[in-house]
């Protein structure tokens, strides 16, 4: 059962309520028993033929405004006194490599590879009672509305559990670019960046700084194989003697121990070289190096080449930074264009050149879109979180989209069996910019992603004596029109 958060609560109280529910679910996960596949009759699900072997999620954390990126609308250049109601897009549209399809200026390199991709312009999200980045990021990444009575697995953990590693020594789930300490809302971020009830061995290898990834998979000085083995035996002994032992299920304890053993194998393998982006030629590194996100895209390519199953690369969620454009929207988005344009396009071309794009699903997505005037969607009672509640632009910081909008978002997908040069769905040309053709929910988007990876949306496990599915209630329906 999902816990409800009263939308009339002030935001700090709503966030505390969310955190209490997430903390309770996390504690319950450690005490829960083993996770089992559903019994015969409940799990007789035909698995689809996989179209992709690996998945790279390029996460635009903070709310990427569709009319400022992949769904341009009527352009209104900056002028003092301009009415806010007349502002739909603050970037002019530019042509792409697909006839008749335009995206926003500043994404010129991505425009050149649009003929390799499918663009969904009708993704939609619910308001969830209270629009918080933490709630919507949790919903998108797990497919379930938080807080929940169990700790829900991240979509990467689902792939790690259901598909396993592509190469035994390579972690199947790797998360690049998101710091989990010192960036605000840290507990909320930790809540969905986990394997949930599946256990530690299916959780992510977190690499907040891609340029330091090589150090993360190198044994510390003096850590020999014998010393590691002694430490592992001592740790097992400590767990067995712990006064908290009865509160931790044997299944979760063993999962933690297996995750440590997997880490040791990686540190002793040749595959650890994949984590070292300094091994790339200088000109290649320069092409990707627009910041941590760009370097993360280069690292993701190297990891997929070497057998990673699921890699997420994020622009990083930090309140009021990056895509979280509650103020000075145009200036901030122009900077974000510069950070993502070259690395995303180069990643697609590099995967294609290496013969990997067809079997790698690349997704560019965000938790919701943005609009200059509307919070949520028509009829929403969500609290307006804009920092500039004005009717007219009187200074440059007012120019740009800076309210949360859940009625119509864009998702860009490459490879993995998707059509090439294809646009699906449509949003209205004038405000409200809601999806007016072929809306795609988070549940159905997850169903589509998992179908591409060869996992039925109805795949389920028994958790605490009840079924739990890869899409909520097993109800996700793949958008088959997207597949070639």
Image (cartoon, rainbow, N blue to C red):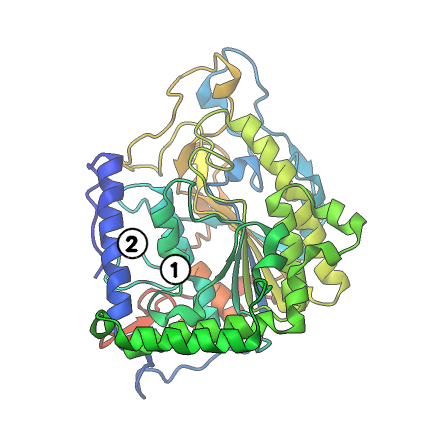
Per the rendering, the mark at residue 331 is: none
Asked whether residue 86 appears in the rendered view, the answer is yes
Image disc number at residue 146 = 2
Is residue 53 at all visible to an observer of this figure? no
Q: Specify the label residue 142 is tagged with.
A: 1
Q: Choose top left, top right, bottom left or bottom right for residue 202.
A: bottom left
Say whether marks 1 and 2 touch (CB < 8 Å).
yes
**Left or right position of 64 against 151:** right
Tell me: 100 left or right of 472: right
Residue at screen point 19% across, 43% down: 6
Instruction: Point out residue 188 in the picture as x, y percentages from the top left corner.
Output: 35, 49
User: On the image, which quarter does residue 69 sit in?
Assistant: top right
Query: x, y percentage for residue 427?
Result: 48, 42
Q: Residues within 10 Å of mark 1 (few under 14, many from 20)?
A: many
The answer to which quarter of the image holds residue 334 is top right
x, y percent for residue 284: 77, 51
């Amino acid at each position: 059962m999902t816990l409800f958060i009263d939308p009339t609560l002030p935001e700090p109280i709503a966030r505390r309520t969310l955190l209490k529910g997430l903390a309770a679910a996390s504690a319950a996960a450690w005490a829960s028993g083993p996770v089992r596949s559903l019994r015969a009759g409940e799990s007789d699900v035909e698995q689809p033929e996989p179209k992709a072997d690996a998945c790279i999620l390029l996460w635009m954390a903070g709310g990427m405004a569709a009319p400022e990126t992949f769904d341009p609308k009527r352009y209104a250049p900056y002028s003092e006194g301009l009415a806010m109601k007349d502002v739909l897009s603050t970037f002019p549209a530019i042509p792409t490599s697909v006839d008749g399809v335009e995206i926003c200026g500043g994404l010129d390199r991505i425009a050149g590879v649009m003929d390799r991709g499918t663009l969904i312009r009708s993704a939609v999200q619910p308001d969830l009672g209270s629009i918080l980045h933490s709630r919507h990021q949790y919903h998108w990444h797990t497919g379930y509305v938080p807080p929940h009575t169990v700790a829900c697995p991240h979509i990467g953990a689902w792939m790690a559990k259901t598909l396993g590693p592509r190469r035994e020594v390579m972690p199947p789930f790797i998360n690049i670019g998101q710091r989990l300490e010192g960036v605000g809302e840290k507990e909320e971020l930790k809540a969905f960046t986990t394997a949930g009830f599946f256990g530690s061995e299916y959780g992510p290898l977190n690499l907040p700084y891609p340029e330091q990834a090589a150090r993360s998979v190198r044994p510390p000085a003096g850590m020999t194989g014998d010393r590691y083995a002694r430490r592992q035996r001592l740790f097992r002994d400590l767990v067995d003697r712990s006064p908290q032992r009865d509160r931790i299920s044997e299944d979760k304890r063993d999962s933690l121990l297996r995750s440590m053993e997997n880490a040791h194998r990686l540190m002793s393998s040749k595959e650890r070289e994949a984590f070292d982006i300094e091994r790339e030629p200088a000109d290649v590194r320069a092409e990707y190096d627009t910041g941590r996100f760009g370097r993360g895209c280069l690292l993701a390519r190297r990891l997929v080449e070497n057998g990673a199953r699921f890699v997420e690369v994020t622009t990083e969620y930090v309140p009021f930074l990056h895509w979280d454009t509650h103020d000075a929207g145009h200036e901030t988005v122009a900077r974000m264009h510069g950070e993502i344009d070259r690395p995303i396009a180069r990643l697609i071309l590099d995967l294609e050149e290496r013969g990997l794009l067809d079997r790698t699903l690349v997704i560019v997505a965000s938790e919701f879109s943005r609009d200059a005037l509307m919070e949520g969607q028509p009829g929403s009672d969500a609290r307006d979180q804009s920092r500039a509640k004005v009717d007219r632009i009187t200074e440059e910081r007012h120019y740009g989209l800076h309210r949360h909008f859940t009625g119509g978002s864009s998702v860009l997908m490459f490879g993995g069996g998707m059509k090439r040069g294809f646009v699906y769905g449509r949003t209205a040309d004038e405000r409200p910019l809601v999806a007016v053709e072929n809306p795609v929910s988070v549940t159905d988007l997850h169903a589509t992603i998992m179908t591409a990876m060869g996992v039925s949306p109805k795949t389920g496990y028994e958790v605490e004596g009840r079924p739990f599915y890869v899409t909520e209630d097993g109800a996700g329906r793949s958008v088959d029109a997207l597949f070639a």
